[in-house]
Amino acid sequence: MLTVIGEALIDEVRHGLQAPVPHVGGSPLNVAVGLARLGHPVQFLGRFGKDAYGTLISAHLHDNSVLVPLLPDNEATSIARCVVDDDGAASYVFELQWDLPGLADKLGFLLEATTIVHTGSIATMLQPGSAQVRHAVLQARPRATISYDPNCRPSIIADAAYARAEAERFVRLADVVKASDEDLAWLYPDLDPLVAARKWLGIGAAGAQEADGGGRGPAVVVVTRGAQGPWAVCAAGETRAAVPPTAVVDTVGAGDSFMAALLSALVDRELDGAQRRDNLHALSAEELGELLRYAAEAAAVTVSRAGANPPSRKELHARIAAGI
């Protein structure tokens, strides 16, 4: 079982002057759906209301075979109002509720069979829910690979110093980290994003983890860079991949599809679970490059169509086999 913890929301997407169209979204939710479409058993731990938008979210998760063990609550479902410009780039304004009361009491049962826990985005920055997520990650680390994507939202968390400190707390706990170059440029304005990524790879230095409940630091840090293609660093070295050719409709959910495919590839290579942490840290640069190329193909499918619409395993593998 793979577990994704984080926000679910409705993207009200507006293209230019057209009327907004609601799409189910939220970075962690998109990752959960992406993993399920790639053939993995997934549970999503998040929140949404009992309103009409909450019903849309619940139906979307169930239609994609994502398990939803937490019931909807009485608060309003979160909304991201998204405007897509002529180049396909998306900007957001949010109306959010983020709290998971009672999650701690259920963690023992919910995480019992989990080999990967993924989290990130708003869920790891916005209180009170972020503290609950961190507690869940700490509980999961002894048995599961931890994956983290900060997916920064300055329109929600405007204090970069606070966001940087929170991101580093989760990076210390993580085995796999993915961030965009825009995330890293905002968090570390005085550093090249690749320099910041190298810093994150070494964040588990002696002493740092002891104060924050972490471990040896991440085995892999990946930076997505739009048209420049993804880049990554591990103990064995650095690697990059080209962006597969595709016609871009919009970029909504591209990073989440990349993240899901990256984790899927780790599972396929039997690198998931705390008992395989040493193997993950021993990953070669060549193997890491293969992971990047696979994840980039998934993102290319997503940007070729509207909204956060990740590929199925059959669809992705057919594209790769065809050499598209």
Image (cartoon, helix red, strand yellow):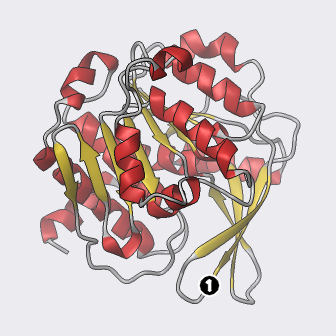
Give the x, y percent position of residue 183: 53, 57
Which amino acid is tagged 1?
A: Asp
Give the x, y percent position of residue 195: 37, 53
Give the x, y percent position of residue 309: 48, 63
Residue 281 in the figure: left or right of residue 51: left
Reading the image, the residue beneath label 1 is 85
Nearer to us in this view, 110 or 62: 110
Q: Please give the name of the residue rendered at 75% of the width and 54% of the height, measured from the top-left corner.
A: 156
Q: Secondary structure at mark 1?
A: loop
Q: Is residue 7 among what the camera can see?
A: no
Give the x, y percent position of residue 22: 71, 66
Eyeballing the image, is 46 above or below 288?
above
Q: Please give the name of the residue rendered at 43% of the width and 31% of the height, measured from the top-left corner.
A: 174
Q: Please give the name of the residue rendered at 72% of the width and 37% of the height, measured from the top-left corner.
A: 47
Residue 215 in the figure: left or right of residue 324: right
Residue 169, by quadrant, is top right
Q: Please give the name of the residue rendered at 43% of the width and 21% of the height, measured from the top-left corner.
A: 114
Eyeballing the image, is 145 above or below 87?
above
Give the quadrant of the N terminus.
Answer: top left
Nearer to us in this view, 184 or 10: 184
Eyeballing the image, is 276 above or below 188?
above
Q: Is residue 215 among what the camera can see?
A: yes
Residue 72 in the figure: left or right of residue 311: right
Give the quadrant of the C terminus.
Answer: bottom left
